[in-house]
Amino acid sequence: MADWGPVVIALVLFVLLSPGLLCQIPGRGRMVEFANLQTSGISILVHTIIYFGLITIFLIAIGVHIYTG
């Protein structure tokens, strides 16, 4: 059986936390901007830290597993 939990969680978090796609923290003019498709270095760093924290919680602390076959 294949464990697809880490793959699905990583993919969903990557799409949701891509800077500038849905939201950007910090934005260029405000703290949070939505769907502006412009990124900065600090925004990429903040989204990377959030991604790492959430992926650690979901995969290591909670232990999400999705088995197929």
Image (cartoon, rainbow, N blue to C red):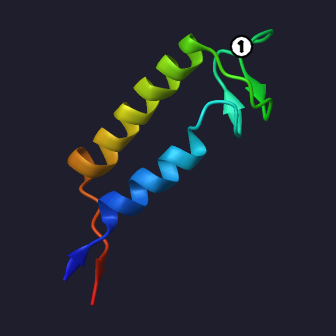
Which quarter of the rendering shows the C terminus? bottom left
Q: Residue at x 78, y 31 (%)?
A: 34
Judge whether 30 appears above or below 2 on screen: above
Residue 35 percent across, percent down from the top left: 79, 35
Which quarter of the rendering shows the N terminus? bottom left
Q: Residue at x 39, y 39 (%)?
A: 54
Residue 38 percent across, percent down from the top left: 73, 24
Judge whether 40 appears above or below 55 on screen: above
For mark 1, give the secondary structure: loop
Q: Residue at x 53, y 22 (%)?
A: 44
Judge whether 29 appears above or below 38 on screen: above
Which quadrant of the view contains residue 20?
top right
Q: Is residue 9 left or right of residue 63?
A: right
Looking at the image, how many numbered discs can be counted on the residues?
A: 1
Mark 1: give few (<14), some (14-19) or many (20+) Cα within 10 Å.
few
Q: Amino acid at mark 1?
A: Met
Which quadrant of the view contains residue 57?
top left
Q: Is residue 2 left or right of residue 7?
A: left
Residue 65 percent across, percent down from the top left: 27, 67
Look at mark 1 in the image and give the residue it sits on.
31
